Amino acid sequence: MSERRLGKPIGFYLGKPIYDFVVQSGKKYVFDRLAECDREGCPLDQLNKDELLFAPGLIYKQS
């Protein structure tokens, strides 16, 4: 199981913290932007290859 490390909270979105960075599977990702979501969810086609989407709609880009 991969370990996840979280950076410092830099704000909140929909009641959840936005962390300045996330380390997932040994790779560091920095907060980039909010995802465009609707009632059905957040379409994954808005992500680039080097990006991850975390609930509730936060996009992190590999640094």
Image (cartoon, helix red, strand yellow):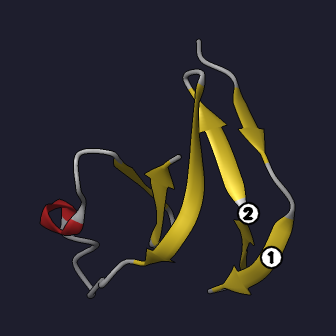
Instruction: Give the residue at x 87% y 60%.
Output: 8
Of all residues shown, which one is farthest toward the right? 8
Instruction: Give the residue at x 45% y 55%.
Output: 61
* Front-most of residues 25 and 39: 25
Of all residues shown, which one is farthest toward the left? 45
Give residue 29's mark: none
Q: Position of residue 18 (x, y in %)?
A: 70, 71
Q: In the rendered image, which quarter contains the N terminus?
A: top right
Q: Residues within 10 Å of mark 1 (few under 14, many from 20)?
A: few
Residue 31 appears anywhere in the view: yes
Q: Which residue is mark 1?
A: 10
Would you place residue 19 above or below residue 51 in this image?
A: below
Q: Position of residue 39 (x, y in %)?
A: 27, 86
Going by the image, does 30 lie left or right of 19? left
Could you give the CA–CA distance between mark 2 and mark 1, rounded to whole angstroms?
6 Å
Q: Are marks 2 and 1 in contact (CB under 8 Å)?
A: yes
* Front-most of residues 15 and 51: 51
Q: Which residue is mark 2?
A: 19
In which image quadrant can residue 15 be found?
bottom right
Residue 56 appears anywhere in the view: no
Instruction: Give the residue at x 50% y 70%.
Output: 32
Q: Position of residue 53 (x, y in %)?
A: 41, 57
The mark that comes first in sequence, 2 or 1, is 1
Q: Position of residue 24 (x, y in %)?
A: 58, 32
Instruction: Give the residue at x 73% y 83%.
Output: 12
Q: Say which element carries label 1.
A: strand
* Type of amino acid under label 1: Ile
Going by the image, does 1 lie left or right of 44? right
Q: Say which element carries label 2.
A: strand
Would you place residue 58 above or below residue 62 in this image?
A: below
* Type of amino acid under label 2: Tyr
